[in-house]
Amino acid sequence: MRIGVNALYLIPGEVGGTEIYLRELLRALAEIDAANEYFVFTNLETGADLTPRQANFQWKPQAVHARFRPARIVWEQTIVPLEAARYRLDIILNPGFTAPVFSSCPSVTVFHDLQHLRHPQYFRWFDLPFWRLLLWASARRSRSLIAVSEATRDDLVRSYPFTRDRIAVVPHGVEAAFFSLDRSRTEDYVLCVSTLHPHKNLDRLIRAYSRRKRDYRLILAGMRGFRAREIEKMATEGVEITGWIPRMELLGLYARARAFIYPSMFEGFGMPVLEAMAAGLPVACSGIAPLREVAGETALFFAPDSEDAIADALDRITTEESLRAKLASAGQERARRFTWRRSAERTLAVLTK
C-alpha cells in the first residue's frame, strides 16, 4: 500500500503530546513495516527528522506554515487531496484530529480527545466554530477513526453516533528510555509535566502546595498555554515553572523527582502519567476515566475539583514510604504493557484492513 501521513498540524515543541505520539508512532512503524510505502507531508516548521530514514519512507515537505492556522487548514483541504492523487495514495493517516474532507483518497483519523465538545469553555471563542466543523466533518468522512483510549471512544460515540462501527481504540506507548532511568540520585521536588492550559488544573495544584512550607519544590514542566500568565503569577516560593524543555532534559527531571502529580480535569489519554509510571515514580493523579484506564490500581487517585484532596495527595505521595514503594513498583510493571510497537501494529492493522 501507499500510505500518506498528514503531519501538517505538527509544530515542533508547540503541540505537546501529539508531537511525541507522531514521532514515536512513525519510528515504530518503520521498525515493523518494510512492505508499505509512506509519504510524510510536513509543513515549513517541521524538518526532515520527523520522517524515518528507511527506504520506504519519503519526506514530502509542503509550502505552508502551520502557525498560520487558516493557511494550514486551506492547504490540508485543497492541496493534500491533490498530493494524494499525485502519489496514488491508497489511504491517508491523519494523526492530528482533522482530515482532508473532500479527498477521493480514504482517511484514517486519530482523535486524541473531544475537549472542544466536553469543555468548550477552555477554547477561545473564535477557534470553537472551526474545531466543531472540521472535527465533525473529519469524523463523518473518515473510513476509520482511531481513539487513543476507551474514554475517548465513548466520547466519540456520544457526540458522533454515526462513528460507532468505525472506531478502533489504539492506546499510546511509552518510550523504552523511561524504564532505564537512573533513579539513584533523587532530589527534593515533586514533578508535574503539563501544558499550562486551563483544564490542567494547575491553579488548584499551586494553591494546595502553597498552603504551608514544604521540604520539597514543585516543578511544573511543559509548554506555555492559554493559562500561562495567570499560572506564572501564582507561582510562590518553591514553585518552579520551566516552560518547554528538550526531551533529554525532561527525562532527567523524571529521573530525579521524588514523586509525580497530575491534577488534570480532562484528558484523552494522559501520556505524562504513563511516562512517570514507566520511570518508576510514585504517581498521584486525578481520578478521571482516562487516567484510571492508564494507571489501573497503580496510582493514588484524587478528586481534581478538591484542593483539599490534592493537598492530601501531595502529603501522602511524599511521606508514606510503603505507599510510595508500592505505587512505584506496580506502576512501572503496568507501564510495560504500553509499547509503541504495539500501537504501531494496531494502527497498521487499521490502515491496511
Image (spheres, rainbow, N blue to C red):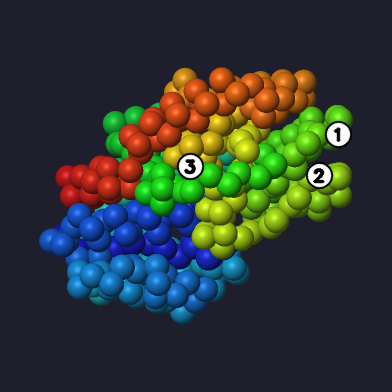
Q: Is residue 125 above or below residue 211?
A: below
The quadrant of the image that shows the C terminus is: top left
Residue 152, horizontal then vertical, whole percent? 45, 33
Query: On the image, which quarter does residue 257 sit in?
Result: top right
- Checking the image for residue 222, the label placed there is none
Which amino acid type is shown beneath numbered disc 3? Ala
Q: Which residue does the image show at 53% across and 65% down from the upper left?
A: 12
Q: Are marks 2 and 1 in contact (CB under 8 Å)?
A: yes
Residue 116, horizontal then vertical, whole percent? 59, 41
10 Å crowding of disc 3: few (<14), some (14-19), many (20+): many
Closer to the chain start, of discs 3 and 1, is 1
Q: Is residue 194 above or below residue 282?
A: below
Closer to the chain start, of discs 2 and 3, is 2
- Residue labelled with disc 2: 238
* Frontmost residue, 21 versus 137: 21
Which amino acid type is shown beneath numbered disc 1? Lys
Residue 112, horizontal then vertical, whole percent? 47, 43
Query: On the image, which quarter does residue 122 sit in?
Result: top right
- Residue labelled with disc 3: 279
Q: Are marks 3 and 1 in contact (CB under 8 Å)?
A: no
The quadrant of the image that shows the N terminus is: bottom left
Does residue 95 appear left or right of residue 73 in this picture? left
- Residue labelled with disc 1: 213
Query: On the image, which quarter does residue 55 sit in?
Result: bottom left
